[in-house]
Image: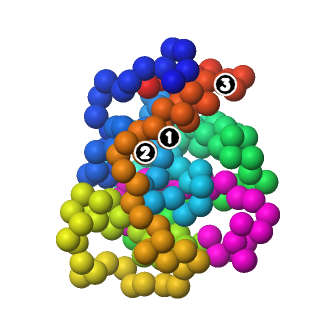
């Protein structure tokens, strides 16, 4: 971890899921965390600290901080994953495909020809593989079945190939990313 970085002293939730060990960057209003089942390497999320389902529910200060955090995390992830570009996506509400009722923005490093078609990432986000609520529930309770889940859509990487990562693996990545966040020219967020 970078000098000055410290362990979070408060629990952090993504919706109802405790994700404190997955957080690698935190500000007064937002946090960034590694993904349980990343669609591509480096896929991370940025969320407001306050658990609300829709962007419209956030205050002006929260929205400003959220998007400044997205910008900072984007710069770092693009650099350390040597990405050619990024997908930055938000599903704002159930009809838009949001599966965890907590505002969150996906940051996905992209490389030329990483997928057969560039826009397949959107199909992946909308698929069962991109269903974050289901992924977290299955990781906590492996017996969860398909009852009540979103319908399956074809994906580039079948769910059988994308296993939930362990808490230890995600905590290691979060520590590494926390160190990388301090290397930029901008001020550090606190952990």
The residue under label 2 is 170
Residue 150 percent coordinates (x, y): 37, 79
Q: Give the range drawn in magenta.
A: 98-121
Residues at marks 2 and 1, CA–CA distance in whole angstroms: 5 Å
Quarter-of-image position of residue 48: top left
Callout 1 secondary element: helix
Q: Does the magenta stretch include residue 141?
A: no
- Number of numbered tags placed on the structure image: 3
- Point out residue 182 in the picture as x, y percentages from the top left corner: 61, 24
Q: Is residue 16 above or below residue 12?
A: below
Q: Is residue 55 left or right of residue 134?
A: right
Give the mark toward the camera: 1 or 3: 1
Label 3 environment density (alpha carbons within 10 Å; few <14, some 14–19, many ≥20) = few
Would residue 166 be seen by someone viewing this image from the given angle?
yes
- Residue 156 vs 80, above or below: the answer is below
Secondary element at image label 3: loop
Which residue in the structure is indicated by mark 1?
Answer: 173
Q: Main secondary structure of the magenta part?
A: loop
- CB atoms at circles 2 and 1 under 8 Å apart? yes
For marks 1 and 3, the one nearer the N-term is 1
- The residue located at (28%, 81%) in the rendering is 146
> Which residue is painted at 36% across and 37% down in the image?
21
Q: In which quarter of the image is the C terminus?
A: top left
Element type where label 2 sits in the image:
helix
Q: Can residue 48 be seen in this view?
A: no
Residue that numbered label 3 is attached to? 183
């Amino acid at each position: 971890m970078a000098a000055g970085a410290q362990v979070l002293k408060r629990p952090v939730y993504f919706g109802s899921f405790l994700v404190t060990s997955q957080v690698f960057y935190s500000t007064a209003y937002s946090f960034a965390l590694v993904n349980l089942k990343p669609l591509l390497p480096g896929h991370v999320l940025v969320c407001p600290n306050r658990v609300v389902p829709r962007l419209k529910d956030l205050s002006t200060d929260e929205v400003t901080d959220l998007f400044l955090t997205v910008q900072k995390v984007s710069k770092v992830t693009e650099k350390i994953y040597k990405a050619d570009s990024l997908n930055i996506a938000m599903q704002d509400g159930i009809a838009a495909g949001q599966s965890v009722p907590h505002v969150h923005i996906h940051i996905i490093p992209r490389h030329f020809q990483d997928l057969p078609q560039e826009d397949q990432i959107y199909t992946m986000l909308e698929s069962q593989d991109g269903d974050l609520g289901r992924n977290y529930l299955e990781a906590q309770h492996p017996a969860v079945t398909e009852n009540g889940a979103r319908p399956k859509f074809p994906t580039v990487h079948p769910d059988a190939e994308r296993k939930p990562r362990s808490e230890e693996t995600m905590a290691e990545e979060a520590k590494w990313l926390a160190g990388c966040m301090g290397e930029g020219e901008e001020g550090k967020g606190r952990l």
